[in-house]
Amino acid sequence: MIVRFFVDVMARKGLNAEQQQAALAKYKTLQEEDMKLLENDRTLFDWCSKQTYIALANMLTGASALGIDSCPIEGFHYDKMNECLAEEGLFDPQEYAVSVAATFGYRSRDIAKKSRKGLDEVVKWVG
């Protein structure tokens, strides 16, 4: 399934079969040797979780730009969440697992102003 995804992406980019095979081989080396992602299921899941946080950051930023409030959520009962999504037919738990969740909506009341340190107190510019 994942290989098919990459082949479809490469085909849309106009890569021929030989170029696709070379790209897949390079990506396989990256995963297996450089990043050692396939050593065990946990290593792969941890890397996939990091990838979901990249998408999550973009979703939260995009929502904010549209005036939509959001909240990333961790620390919930992951097994129950996976079970619930599987029961609803939303994914196959043999292939996927939840790593993070987020809520989106509009606040019902204004929130208290946050008291944060100034930028100069938390950032040191180098160079």
Image: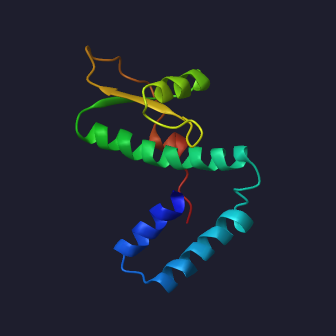
Q: Is residue 25 above or below residue 3?
A: below
Kindly identify the residue that appears in the image at 55 percent across and 66 percent down: 127
| Residue 47 coordinates in the image, percent (x, y) | 62, 50
For residue 68, side relative to residue 32 (left or right): left
Of all residues shown, which one is farthest toward the top? 109
Q: Quadrant of residue 36?
A: bottom right
| Count of marks overlaid on the render | 0
Kindly identify the residue that appears in the image at 36 percent across and 30 percent down: 70
From the viewer's side, name the closer residue of 77 and 65.
77
Of all residues shown, which one is farthest toward the right? 39
Q: How is the image coloured?
A: rainbow
From the viewer's side, name the closer residue of 17 and 55.
17
Q: Quadrant of residue 13?
A: bottom left
Kindly identify the residue that appears in the image at 52 percent across and 58 percent down: 2
From the viewer's side, name the closer residue of 77 and 20.
20
| Residue 12 coordinates in the image, percent (x, y) | 35, 72
For residue 25, side relative to residue 70 (left or right): right
Q: Is residue 59 above or below residue 35?
A: above
| Residue 96 coordinates in the image, percent (x, y) | 55, 41
For residue 89, side relative to residue 25 (left or right): left
Kindly identify the residue that appears in the image at 42 percent across and 81 percent down: 15
Q: Is residue 118 above or below residue 39?
A: above
